[in-house]
Image (tube, rainbow, N blue to C red):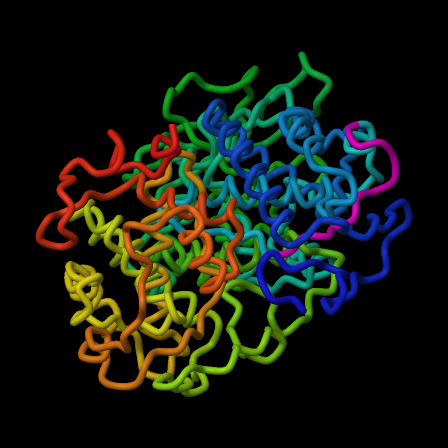
Amino acid sequence: TCNAAPCVIGGNGSPTASPLPPGITRAPVASHSDEEQAQILADAKEDILNLIGDNPALSAKFLRMAFHDCVGGCDGCIDLENPDNVGLAEPIDALADTVAAVPDNAGISRTDIWALAALTAAEETNTAGLRFPMTWIGRQDCEGGRLEAAKAGPHRELPGPDLTTHKLLEFFDNEFGFNPRQVTALFGAHSIGSLARENSGFDGPNGWDNSNRRLDNNYYRINMGGNSASDPIEELVEDAPNWTQRQVNNNNLQTPNRFQWERNGGNGNGNGGGNNGGNNNGGNNNNDRIVMLNVDISLVRDMEGFMDESTGEVSCQFRRPNNGEPTCPHAAQTLEFAAEYAFDNDLFLNDFRDVFSLLLVHGYDTSVTCNAAPCVIGGNGSPTASPLPPGITRAPVASHSDEEQAQILADAKEDILNLIGDNPALSAKFLRMAFHDCVGGCDGCIDLENPDNVGLAEPIDALADTVAAVPDNAGISRTDIWALAALTAAEETNTAGLRFPMTWIGRQDCEGGRLEAAKAGPHRELPGPDLTTHKLLEFFDNEFGFNPRQVTALFGAHSIGSLARENSGFDGPNGWDNSNRRLDNNYYR
């Protein structure tokens, strides 16, 4: 019953939400279909992308808001009377119209929209183009009116900025059940954003690292020496760029004075300037100055016994002894993970996505077999594939994990994007190929002897290496790769930045060798070019069960591509409309 992302927490056939804490009530049962919910989420995501486009600083604020909301259980309510939440009114207000646009009883809560905003922010800012899918909906909002309750949530004790390694790990273990690797990965969220004295008392207008609009591993790299994660501990510690602690004087604000670590923002090693215990109103004037909090430094240095937890002042040095003070020991429980992330951005981003996705369902039970896209057709807990037509055989049961399959699809998508980048005309050809393949049932095989399929050898051949790179028994077929190519083409060419997620894998290929069978598929009767309205609608109703609106929408694929006499006999080198590299409504206009 949980047959496609987003899966519904507590929905019929999906996992039941864990007992709700006081002040949280169940949302009414959704009265909207899966398709309607998907459209609501797509519209909300488009709003969020526009908000981020107009104000890129919102990305970091959406991530911060989601974390603060999910301490104690994600419930779409934050106590703005709590000084730790100062500044969060801005992202709450930014999303107010998006939240209000969600119909009543849609089964999508304010908490869901906040989670979607955080996932979208991570997706837009990460440097690997990694997708952060909205896998779950149905989170429960705390009681009260929408905007009013959002700003008057229950008081939650948040982790302070002056935690030692032990205290930091203890908090995240008790609150979320996160292990040291997960905690280390989660803190990479600090690679985007900045720190404002009026919000937190810390003075960091340039943020934690020198690329504070990009979600990447630079947050770890600037704390690490050596040349690889396998280097000796001494090199990782002693060769690291230095940090020095300075006091920020907030006497002109209703905020306590703070101690923060600073250095200039370059990547080179060096002492970074400043002295422990220095006192300055607001901060030094280095335009490239970057900062770390004690809680950040605790991922690489163990300040147990050296930190005054009432003020945050630390009596050990980050790297080289100065003024006779000792050097802080390395953080034995987390330094190795920080080192791995420092030298492997993809590892960091994948681990961050995993732990951040767990954070966003904190307080709910998500134990279900089909718990993330792509769901497997015919897999345990997903719908059973329909009976296979003659000539199509079931693929062997997948021997690869969900994570391995996700990586295979990510690698394949990267190949497809490169193909389209080198030859933009392939976008339309991938869409045409997918349609011709799916008449009669998608099976990764096209009869090139059929004159209607002339020209399709090019996209088949273009994808041959991508198909061949998929390991045997991965549970991902040639048909799946063709579908991924079509979805990627639509995603890359549409003018709204709309995502076309790869929700299903496990389609079945027709019998025979990979490339040979792909070009010698069973004969299928395709719709001719000279159909009346009645005949056109009759074909798509009989073949796919599509209604007139769906047929009309599908033909918008003709907004990209062109017509070649040598393929179809039609002479249209400029295509159907005057923007034939863009998937848009100009075809109808």
The C terminus lies in which quarter of the figure? top left
Q: Nearer the viewer, residue 369 or 477?
A: 477
Q: Is residue 143 visible?
A: yes
Give x and y (percent) for residue 235. Answer: 32, 58
Q: Is residue 320 visible?
A: no
Q: Quadrant of residue 78?
A: top right
Magenta highlight on residue 143: yes
Q: Quadrant of residue 203?
A: top right
Horizontally, residue 451 falls left or right of residue 505, namely: left
246 to 31, vertically: above or below:
above
| Magenta-highlighted residues | 136-147
Seen at 85% across and 55% down, the residue is 20
Seen at 70% across and 55% down, the residue is 171
Magenta highlight on residue 564: no
Give x and y (percent) for residue 377. Answer: 51, 74
Give x and y (percent) for residue 230. Answer: 33, 66
The N terminus lies in which quarter of the figure? bottom right
User: Majority secondary structure of the magenta segment?
Assistant: loop
Horizontally, residue 215 falls left or right of residue 514, namely: right
